[in-house]
Amino acid sequence: MTQNRPVPSDYFQDWKAREALAEGMIPLVGKMYRENNVSCYIYGRALVNKSVIDIMKAHRFVRQIEHNELSEFDTFPIISMLAKLDLSYSHIDVGRLAVGFMNDESGATLEEYVQSHLDDSLNSTKKPIDDSRDVVLYGFGRIGRLMARLLIEKTGGGDVLRLKAVVVRPGGEGDLIKRASLLRRDSVHGGFKGTIRVDEENNRLICNGNPIQFIYANAPDDIDYNSYGIDNAILVDNTGKWRDEAGLGLHLKSKGISQVLLTAPGKGDIKNIVYGINHEAIQPSDKIVSAASCTTNAITPVLSVMMDEYGVENGHVETVHAFTNDQNLIDNFHSAERRGRAAPLNMVLTETGAAKAVAKALPSLAGKLTGNAIRVPTPNVSMAILNLTLEKETTKEELNEFMRRISLHSSLRKQIDFTDSPDVVSSDFVGSRTACIFDAKATIVNGRHAVLYCWYDNEFGYSCQVQRIVERLAGVKYDIIPRQD
């Protein structure tokens, strides 16, 4: 970004003016989303269903990362222009359009510049998917509930993906009310953004107008989903109980299920997919795929770009991971070593298969990485420390600038975020939608040796990666404006 905005003579009046513009964006952005399935962003930060302050902070983010100013004065005219056009089924990054216009030297007006990026999308009736796809969540734990939030949030006009059902084990009296409460309130991620109505008579939750059927079952293959009006559905198995083709294949025996996505590393020949890296390996004929693990999703994008730019001879991955439900709150029996000790009171040294699992997405790294994990007494957000021996020398400044460019201008923008703040800590990344956040302040480089620090929301960031795979399985393709790199 090359434009420097003049320093305002009155900061307060400047703030109030920009605040008014952000307020004015909300109904325009909302109308485009509800009526035309158009989603607006500022450098990947969604503007749909956001507050005035959220929108203003999205603009501020660009200044922090691009080292220059992006103002509501720049973006509001573009949003106003878009709201008057016949657009549909598009993801439009208004921030990138604004910055592109600032740097444009063709002499085009703002309207001409924006129109040049929209020509193929104007008056288009092309949908991102021919027919909407039903989605079923099997399990309603940490990932299951976050997936429900994401699917409900992204319902849009209702003709792309629809969460139709959640399958859980039979519970006692008041089961549905308890599950509604867990969806409504979350100690880590805050409250559900919307309304939830409990329909006990029909075993349904009505979430932001979406009727979600709760189905009680003990086995994957004894459910007739057709009887609930569900057909050709993608089932997301959040339980982790079955990880091989034989176990996950039981879902396919139930009427109405056509594809299965596992939210854990798959075993055998099941494709382990890290979206952004090897999602193109998904074929229409694939019936079962895995979204790998949260750690594999966090480290694979960074390792991929490091391989491409510098080469990696070998390395060690140490994950500092938030404790999880499979650990004990107080000391008790556990089949795994050390995990029986009290999770809130101890750092627990344990294993991770993430380093080896990377090779399933990046075969060129097979045999080059080792890994271990330390579970720590925090409920969410983890860190991966990549200790790498590179094939060529570099410097901290060069490597950090490379990663900054990757996070802003590459096809991995949704996988790799970037921070250069001296005071960030783990809680700052709760709710991150990227697979990881590269911490530039912590980078260590000594010739061919580099130590990289990557934060990741092991719950929500991972769930966003799972959501992207669901869209890929369904064949969803949005028109991206401006065009991807």
Image: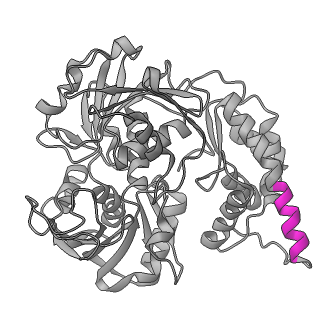
Q: With 130 as the anchor, is 381 left or right in this view?
A: left
Compared to 419, does 253 lie above or below?
above
Q: Position of residue 243 (x, y in %)?
A: 16, 40
Q: Closest to the observer: 369 or 32?
A: 32
**Horizontal and vertical percent position of residue 152:** 52, 36
How many labels were placed on the picture? 0
Front in this rendered view, residue 372 or 196: 196
Residue 206's place in the image compared with 116, above or below, is: above
The answer to whether residue 113 shows anywhere in this view is no
| Left or right of 352, for residue 485 | right
Q: Residue at x 57, y 24 (%)?
A: 127
Residue at the (20%, 60%) spot, across then down: 365
> Does 459 sit above or below residue 396?
above
Q: Nearer the viewer, residue 143 or 246?
A: 143
Residue 115: percent from left, percent from top: 76, 39
| Model colouring | one colour
* Relative image position of residue 212 (x, y in whole percent): 46, 28
Is residue 140 found left or right of 201 in the rendered image?
left
Residue visible at 11% across and 60% down? 334
Q: Quadrant of residue 172?
A: top left
Question: What type of secondary structure mainly makes up the magenta span?
Answer: helix
Residues drawn in magenta: 11-21
Most distant residue in the front direction: 173
Q: Is residue 255 visible?
A: yes
Kindly give the residue lying farthest to the bottom in the view shown: 446
Q: Quadrant of the N terminus?
A: bottom right
Residue 288, above or below 420: above
Specify whether 392 is left or right of 402: left
In the rendered image, residue 457 lying in the magenta stretch gets the answer no
